[in-house]
Image (spheres, rainbow, N blue to C red):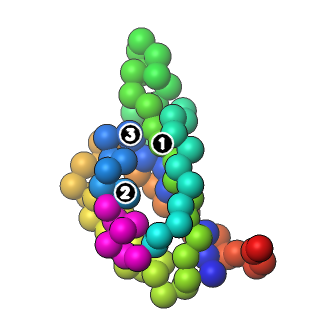
Amino acid sequence: MKAIFITYDQAHHEKIIEALDRTSCRGFTSFGTVQGRGSKTGEPHYGSHAWPSLATATITMVEDDRVEPLLERLRKLDEERPLLGLRAFVWTVEQSI
């Protein structure tokens, strides 16, 4: 099992949920509004006067075979609107209840 942590501009939220649905990744937790700045490119997401945009973070736990289909959809979404910002990180889940 893998955990996929996705951070993205709020404008992507509906498309992220759609990507989860279309890859049969049913369970997820969305953290709502988060702030941050990308490590390479893109605008900061601080929700301030100077940097008004905000981000969202979502985590999902999926079976190993669902990782690549989801990441491919996320890559395409990021390529369509690269200035918005979208990142995904995959971790191995060793145990769960």
Residue found at x 40% / y 66%: 20
Query: Can residue 14 be seen?
Result: yes
What residue sits right under mark 1 in the picture? 56
The front one of 34 and 82 is: 34
Majority secondary structure in the magenta region = helix
What residue sits right under mark 2 in the picture? 16
- Point out the tag, 2 or 1, that comes first from the N-terminus: 2
In the image, 60: left or right of 75?
right
Per the rendered image, the range of residues in magenta is 18-24
- Point out the tag, 3 or 2, that comes first from the N-terminus: 3
Q: CA distance from mark 3 to mark 2?
A: 10 Å
Q: CA distance from mark 2 to mark 1?
A: 10 Å
Residue 10, disc: 3
Label 3: few (<14), some (14–19) or many (≥20) C-alpha neighbours in 10 Å: many
Circles 3 and 2, Cβ within 8 Å, touching? The answer is: no
> Residue 9 sits in which quadrant?
top left
